[in-house]
Image: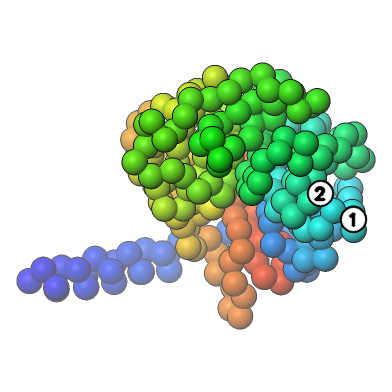
């Protein structure tokens, strides 16, 4: 009986998904890229496979680009402030700040911190930096001269297992650190650990109000941590393509496939 009910549920879910009308396409852009980020204004940013960094407006028109061949591959992008876009090159521990037209404003060498294996960095609300120090197990805030402003608490005293973060973002006086194994670690504005949201497997994260938006397979999930509820947005699947990343902003679904970037108009 349980098996029968499970089969019925799966068939119903599949039929429901099939019944959903397709989302209209705003624009489809041929591109091979490995990173997608979207800012609060609806601009999309991609890191092309040749390491070019390209900005598209909400209509899918290319409006700016930047490339540096001296710093290696771009590993981390932060576009939470469209006026101060951050690129991080982990191999050489170089960080570049760009303006809204992707012209370079500042470049920092994080090797001056004498820290190894800095994987994630985020821009703070006032334009400083959040850096996770794996050696001391602390989340620290630095100014643009790489001076310490805040040293967070030692996570070895609070967690049984230290995080291996893959993504970092600040929103509304909270810092969110994604660890694919443990979930999403939450810190306050002083770098102190608050709690862990048991949502493993998250590699990229948007924070909109009380919602955390992240991708799980072919679904974009908006988790409201105040209401403790989820909203799921199916990501359109195109034959002979692979979904690389997806993001959502202003009723537009942005999907980076392995051979194109597609902007869909949400009908919900």
Camera-side residue: 106 or 79? Answer: 106
Please give the name of the residue rendered at 43% of the width and 43% of the height, measured from the top-left corner: 162
Question: Could you tell whether 27 is left or right of 6 in the image?
Answer: right
Give the crowd class for mark 1: few <14, some 14-19, many >=20 residues within 10 Å: few
Place residue 127 in its image quadrant.
top right
Camera-side residue: 262 or 160? Answer: 160
Place residue 145 in its image quadrant.
top right
* Tag of residue 55: 2
Residue identifier under label 1: 70
In the rendered image, residue 11, in percent from the top left (x then y), is placed at: 29, 71
First in sequence, mark 1 or 2: give its number.
2
156 relative to 93, above or below: above
Question: Could you tell whether 102 is left or right of 251 in the image?
Answer: right
Residue at the limit of the structure toward the front, as seen here:
114
Please give the name of the residue rendered at 76% of the width and 46% of the height, measured from the top-left corner: 93
Please give the name of the residue rendered at 91% of the width and 39% of the height, measured from the top-left corner: 104
Give the crowd class for mark 2: few <14, some 14-19, many >=20 residues within 10 Å: many
Residue 16 visible in the current orientation: yes
Dots 1, 2 in contact, CB < 8 A: no
Residue 208 visible in the current orientation: no
What colour scheme governs how the chains and residues are painted in the rendered image of this protein? rainbow
In the rendered image, residue 142, in percent from the top left (x then y), is placed at: 70, 26
Circle 2 — which element? strand
């Amino acid at each position: 009986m349980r098996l029968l009910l499970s089969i019925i549920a799966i068939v119903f879910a599949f039929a429901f998904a099939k019944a959903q009308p397709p989302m209209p396409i705003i624009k489809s852009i041929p591109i091979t890229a490995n990173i997608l980020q979207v800012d609060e204004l609806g601009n999309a940013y991609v890191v092309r496979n040749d390491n070019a960094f390209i900005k598209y407006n909400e209509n899918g028109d290319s409006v700016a680009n930047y490339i540096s061949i001296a710093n290696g591959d771009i590993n981390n992008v932060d576009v939470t402030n469209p006026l101060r876009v951050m690129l991080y090159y982990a191999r050489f521990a170089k960080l570049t700040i760009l303006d809204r037209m992707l012209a370079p404003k500042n470049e920092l060498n994080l090797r001056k911190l004498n820290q190894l294996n800095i994987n994630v960095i985020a821009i703070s609300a006032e334009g400083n930096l959040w850096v996770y120090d794996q050696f001391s197990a602390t989340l620290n805030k630095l100014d643009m001269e790489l001076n310490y402003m805040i040293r967070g608490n030692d996570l070895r005293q609070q967690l049984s297992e230290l995080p291996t973060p893959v993504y970092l973002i600040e929103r509304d006086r909270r810092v969110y650190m994604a660890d694919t194994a443990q979930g999403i670690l939450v810190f306050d504005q002083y770098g102190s650990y608050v709690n862990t949201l048991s949502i493993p497997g998250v590699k990229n994260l948007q924070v909109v109000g009380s919602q955390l938006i992240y991708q799980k397979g072919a679904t974009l999930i908006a988790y409201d941590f105040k209401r403790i509820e989820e909203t799921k947005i199916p990501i359109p699947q195109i034959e002979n393509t692979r979904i690389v990343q997806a993001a959502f902003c202003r009723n537009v679904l942005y999907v980076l496939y392995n051979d194109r970037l597609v902007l869909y108009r949400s009908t919900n």
